[in-house]
Image (cartoon, helix red, strand yellow):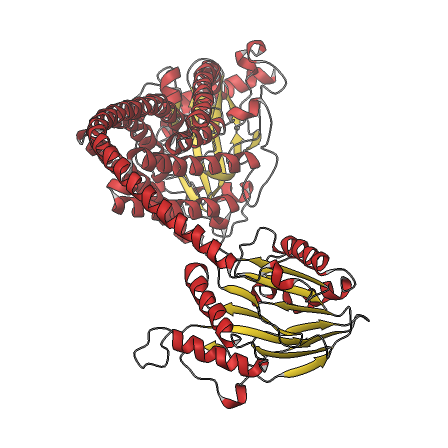
């Protein structure tokens, strides 16, 4: 009975009141498109922001045309009034698209006075009809819309009031509310899933190809392509589709999770991947086209654009745009972002064309690929800034409805771009391989030519080098022979064993030139007066041949000093040696070029008196008694020879000392004490180590002492280079 009364009331209203409401009523019939808007919409701005439905009905006469209000204000509250009549002849369910509005609440007042309250759950409603049931097992009527759905019975006239708030990031551009036939939309959604699956499958395949190719080639351009296509896949995966759900919601539901100030984690993902995809695409395009090298100005511009988009994305994701002080600037920033995207894409389009014209054939694929991306991306930008899109002219059929959605429209553009860009990457790789092949061929030809020239040159030079080598070898043999002969001469001037007989209990000398010949020499007088004889050690300036020549002069000078078989005071003998060296090198002359000399020590040993007279010039004497007591006698601070004469205060002084049988005497040049080595390779052998060895081995023979010191010295030196000639004499009296 009640149902009959409803039909009667509806018929009366249709018959009697049609003329009265015709001006404000939107008629739904067989000609109404699948998606439509009510042009007779009325709106009211709720300044107080707390009016309820009853109060709004009382102020229904204050509703005006949206043109009188203008563009919806951000963070403002509005009431929108629709009057609709279903004249299609049967009941219909219509979904209300809440996109662009925040906290949409719908109140449907039926002809019998019954009121139905509906509400949207946010920017993108959190609902996935496929989480619990597979696609193939879902019937069309089971596709529940996440948007508010209104039942309009056949012939029924209803009043619909909407209470809405404006979203700051992507606000609506007018007060027109989109309606859609829910059943037909569900059917369209069912078939659009195959298109969306095709997009994702294609992008997933391209992603796998790009990642594998990047690892194989180790090329930076391929790496950027892999990064972009991976982010592009995730961006499409997170895009909202026809019914407001996201593609990844077939696997996981993130809509109930809030992040920062956004409606949901799902929306944050979608927005974040969208910004990241744009940035990664520009980075790849710059690398692919060589923008940094060929178009440096554009490269700097894109750097600034990447920084701007990054900040814009962070502000969008963190909800900064919802702050009251920032809200007024959001439309301007969104407009700047939209036009900046278009400007960057056009610039890259021009660059690809110019690169193709300059001879880089692979650039044509980029040129072709960017065209669909610009077209489909422009549709998304148009939807953001409120400009009518050319796709709006498509019919309300399955594919047309699919392309009218700006989010899925963008996904199609990305997929087409990625498919063609894969050809661009492959073409670039082939082009580079051809360039490398041609370069290698040219290099081979050049090398072959150079080899031919070199072979003739080498044959000529080889003959010349052979002749030069023979000459150098002959000269080398002469030099080596001369040096070896000089070495024999130098060794010949050292004391012969006959001079050592009956003079020492034991005598041993360690004499090793740094080179084949050197500047160190030790000397023993050949004559003997009343059991007294002289021992000397000299360290001459230089090494090798110069040092050897100077040591010969010193040795001959000592022979001259002691030629009369007279007992000499050691200090006086050293002064005489200084005179002979200076005279032999003409150092007293003003034009003398020699400034060489030697350090020396001279001993006068009197066996009958058991005394040793010592004098030294820089060099000293070690005296170790049988008790192990060691005394080091230092020489004077002067050297012998050189152009500067010895000052009176620096002249050698003779020191006389007693000795007992078994006492050990040792003389060492600075080649022993100054040699670096040890664990660090930087520490000198030093006097302390030498003295410790002399104390330890003082009871052994002179030969055993020098052997022990030689082994310890070699271990200390290690792999370090020999610095100087070394001389060490040890004797016992």
Identify which residue is drawn at 45% across, 15% down: 184
Q: Is residue 718 above or below residue 104?
A: below
Residue 443 % position (x, y): 25, 28
User: Between 259 and 304, which is closer to the camera in this rendering?
Assistant: 304
Q: Is residue 271 above or below residue 147?
A: below
- Considering every residue shown, the one lying at the far right of the view is 627
Residue 463 % position (x, y): 24, 33
Q: Is residue 104 above or below residue 696?
A: above
User: Between 217 and 532, which is closer to the camera in this rendering?
Assistant: 532
Side of 646 relative to 251 (left or right): left
> Is residue 196 in sight in this rendering?
yes
Q: Is residue 698 above or below residue 707?
A: below
Which quadrant would the C terminus be assigned to in this image? bottom right
Side of 123 relative to 673 (left or right): left
User: Between 68 and 318, which is closer to the camera in this rendering?
Assistant: 318
Residue 500 % position (x, y): 64, 63
> Is residue 331 in sight in this rendering?
no
Give the image quarter of residue 18: top left
Identify which residue is drawn at 32% across, 33% down: 288
User: Between 512 and 12, which is closer to the camera in this rendering?
Assistant: 512
Give the image quarter of residue 29: top left
- Considering every residue shown, the one lying at the far left of the view is 357
Side of 654 relative to 66 (left or right): right
Number of residue marks:
0
Which quadrant would the N terminus be assigned to in this image? top right
- Considering every residue shown, the one lying at the far bottom of the view is 648
Residue 255 % position (x, y): 58, 33
């Amino acid at each position: 009975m009640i149902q009959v009364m409803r039909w009667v009331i509806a018929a009366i209203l249709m018959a009697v009141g049609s003329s009265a409401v015709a001006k404000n009523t939107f008629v739904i019939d067989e000609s109404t498109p699948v998606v439509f808007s009510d042009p007779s919409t009325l709106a009211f701005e709720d300044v107080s922001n707390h009016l309820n439905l009853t109060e709004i009905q009382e102020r229904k006469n204050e509703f005006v045309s949206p043109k009188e209000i203008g563009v919806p204000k951000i963070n403002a509250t509005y009431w929108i009034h629709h009057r609709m009549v279903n004249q299609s002849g049967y009941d219909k369910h219509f979904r209300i698209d809440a996109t662009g509005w925040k906290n949409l609440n719908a109140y449907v007042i039926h002809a019998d006075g019954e009121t139905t309250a509906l509400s949207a759950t946010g920017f993108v409603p959190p609902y996935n009809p496929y989480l619990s049931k597979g696609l193939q097992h879902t019937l069309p009527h089971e596709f529940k819309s996440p948007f508010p759905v209104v039942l309009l019975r056949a012939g029924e006239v209803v009043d619909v009031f909407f209470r809405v708030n404006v979203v700051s990031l992507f606000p609506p551009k007018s007060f027109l509310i989109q309606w859609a036939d829910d059943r037909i939309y569900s059917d369209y959604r069912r078939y659009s899933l195959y298109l969306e699956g095709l997009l994702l499958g294609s992008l997933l395949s391209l992603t796998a190809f790009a990642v594998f190719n990047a690892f194989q080639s180790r090329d930076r351009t391929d790496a950027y392509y892999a990064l972009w296509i991976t982010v592009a896949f995730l961006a499409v995966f997170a895009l909202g589709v026809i019914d407001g759900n996201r593609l990844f919601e077939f696997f996981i539901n993130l809509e109930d999770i809030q992040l920062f100030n956004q409606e949901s984690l799902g929306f944050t993902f979608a927005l974040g991947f969208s910004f990241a995809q744009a940035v990664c695409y520009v980075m790849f395009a710059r690398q692919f086209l060589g923008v940094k090298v060929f178009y440096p100005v554009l490269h700097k511009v894109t750097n600034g654009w990447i920084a701007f988009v990054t900040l814009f994305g962070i502000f969008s994701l963190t909800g900064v745009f919802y702050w009251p002080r920032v809200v007024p600037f959001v439309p301007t920033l969104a407009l700047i972002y939209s036009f900046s995207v278009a400007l960057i894409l056009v610039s890259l389009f021009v660059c690809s064309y110019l690169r193709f014209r300059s001879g880089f054939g692979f650039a044509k694929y980029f040129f072709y690929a960017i065209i669909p991306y610009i077209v489909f991306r422009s549709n998304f930008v148009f939807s953001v800034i409120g400009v009518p899109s050319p796709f709006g002219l498509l019919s309300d059929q399955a594919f047309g409805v699919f392309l009218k959605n700006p989010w899925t429209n963008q996904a199609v553009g990305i997929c087409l771009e990625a498919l063609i860009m894969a050809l661009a990457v492959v073409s670039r790789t082939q082009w580079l391989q051809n360039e490398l092949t041609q370069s290698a061929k040219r290099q081979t030809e050049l090398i072959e030519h150079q080899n031919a020239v070199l072979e003739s040159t080498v044959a000529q030079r080889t003959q010349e080098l052979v002749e030069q080598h023979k000459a150098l070898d002959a000269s080398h043999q002469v030099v080596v022979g001369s040096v070896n002969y000089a070495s024999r001469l130098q060794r010949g001037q050292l004391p012969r064993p006959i001079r050592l007989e009956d003079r020492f209990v034991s005598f041993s000398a360690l004499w090793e030139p740094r080179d084949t010949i050197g500047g160190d020499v030790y000397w023993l007088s050949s004559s003997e007066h009343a059991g007294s004889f002289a021992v000397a050690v000299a360290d001459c300036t230089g090494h090798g041949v110069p040092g050897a020549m100077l040591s010969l002069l010193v040795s001959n000078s000592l022979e001259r000093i002691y030629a009369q078989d007279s007992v000499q005071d050691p200090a006086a003998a050293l002064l005489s040696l200084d005179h002979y060296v200076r005279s032999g090198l003409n150092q007293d002359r003003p034009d003398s070029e020699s400034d060489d000399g030697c350090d020396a020590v001279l001993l006068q040993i009197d066996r009958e008196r058991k005394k040793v007279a010592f004098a030294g010039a820089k060099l000293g004497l070690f005296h170790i008694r049988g008790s192990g007591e060691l005394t080091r006698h230092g020489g004077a601070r002067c050297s012998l020879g050189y152009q500067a004469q010895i000052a009176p205060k620096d002249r050698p002084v003779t020191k006389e000392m007693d000795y007992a049988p078994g006492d050990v005497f040792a003389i060492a040049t600075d080649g022993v004490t100054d040699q670096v080595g040890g664990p660090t390779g930087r520490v000198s052998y030093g006097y302390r180590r030498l003295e410790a060895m002399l104390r330890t081995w003082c009871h052994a023979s002179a030969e055993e002492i020098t052997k022990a010191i030689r082994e310890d010295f070699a271990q200390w030196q290690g792999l370090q280079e020999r610095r100087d000639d070394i001389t060490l004499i040890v004797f016992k009296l």
